[in-house]
């Protein structure tokens, strides 16, 4: 049995909820009248008596509506006003994004076992649904996905290069991440010239890591240079000092 969610507003209110959702028992001071709650400035009170809809739960001091009735009413309103709810949720998330991400990350770190147990239990409850979702992929669907991937790659070559580099960096546990916009910025800073041979890179170019990922280099924009295809093939995964020596740029 676990404490009723939201019951922490009063330390001496000891109420327990059984697994089936019904209130199983209370402490000696579990019952708090509405008059007492008003006097003490509490948001909720508890009588231990069913509401008119048959729920035994905390009640709002102001409206006398029980929390379960309020939850049901909120769900019904949300089902009728999905667009309004979606817009409000989106606006709230954008306004509080950093706080939400920090809170979620902290919860996951401190409740790993609890989350894993929930996922395991959820899988067991819905095993038949997961089996249906994992139907074998047909040859036709594979062909469609391959066609879409090719179309995306042709339409977004820079984004695709950045994605491949990110995957490679993750495999090597390399820090940092550059974007297609970073590539365009670097090209402009290089004045559309290869850093190796000074050839034009307006039409064709390769994105190169100054310090190779295989040698511990970062995948961030600070470790990116743009080379012509020929220079990039020659440089390969060479150390930048060695590469500069081969080009005669160092004594």
Image (spheres, rainbow, N blue to C red):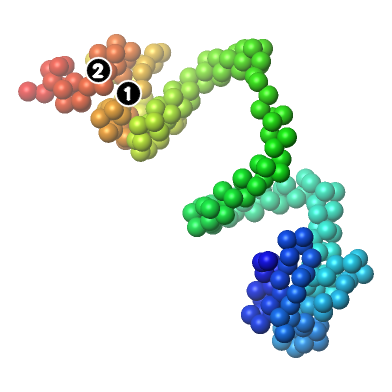
Task: State yes or no: discs 1 and 2 in contact (Cβ < 8 Å).
Answer: yes
Q: Which quadrant would the C terminus be assigned to in this image?
A: top left
Q: Residue 235 carries which label?
A: 2
* Residue 103: quarter of image: bottom right
Task: Please state which of residues 178 and 68 is positioned toward the viewer in this rendering.
Answer: 68
Residue 173 x, y percent position in the rendering: 36, 36
Total marks in image = 2
Tell whether 77 sits left or right of 4: right
Mark 2 secondary-structure assignment? helix
Q: Which residue lies most toward the right here?
A: 52
The crowding category of the residue bearing disc 2, from other C-alpha atoms within 10 Å (few below 14, some 14 to 19, many at least 20), is many
Residue 133 vertical position relative to residue 140 in the rendered view, above or below = below
| Residue located beneath label 1 in the image | 208
Give whichever of discs 1 and 2 has the lower sequence position: 1
Determine whether 93 is above or below 154 in the image.
Answer: below
Location of residue 183 in the rendering, given as x and y in whole percent from the top left corner: 40, 27
How many angstroms separate mark 1 from mark 2 (CA)? 9 Å
Q: Is residue 43 visible?
A: no
Q: Can residue 74 be seen in this view?
A: yes
Name the residue rendered at 83%, 70% in the picture: 56
Nearest the camera: 235 or 228?
235
């Amino acid at each position: 049995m676990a404490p009723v969610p939201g019951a922490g507003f009063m330390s001496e209110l000891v109420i327990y909820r059984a697994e089936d959702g019904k209130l199983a028992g209370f402490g000696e001071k579990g019952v708090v009248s509405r008059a007492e709650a008003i006097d003490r400035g509490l948001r909720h009170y508890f009588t231990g008596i069913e509401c008119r809809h048959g729920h035994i739960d905390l009640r709002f001091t102001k409206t006398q509506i029980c929390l379960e009735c309020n939850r049901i009413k909120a769900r019904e309103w949300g089902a009728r006003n999905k667009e309004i709810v979606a817009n409000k949720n989106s606006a709230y998330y954008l306004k509080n994004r950093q706080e939400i991400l920090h809170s979620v990350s902290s919860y996951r770190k401190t409740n790993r076992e609890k989350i894993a147990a929930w996922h395991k239990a959820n899988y067991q409850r819905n095993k038949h649904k997961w089996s249906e979702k994992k139907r074998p992929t047909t040859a036709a669907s594979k062909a469609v996905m391959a066609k879409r991937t090719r179309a995306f790659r042709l339409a977004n070559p820079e984004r695709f290069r950045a994605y491949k580099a990110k995957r490679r960096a993750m495999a090597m546990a390399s820090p940092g991440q550059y974007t297609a916009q970073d590539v365009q910025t670097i090209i402009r800073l290089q004045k559309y010239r290869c850093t190796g041979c000074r050839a034009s890179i307006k039409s064709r170019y390769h994105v190169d890591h100054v310090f190779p990922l295989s040698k511990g280099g970062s995948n961030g924009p600070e470790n990116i240079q743009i080379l012509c295809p020929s220079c990039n093939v020659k440089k390969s995964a060479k150390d930048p000092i060695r590469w500069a020596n081969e080009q005669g740029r160092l004594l």
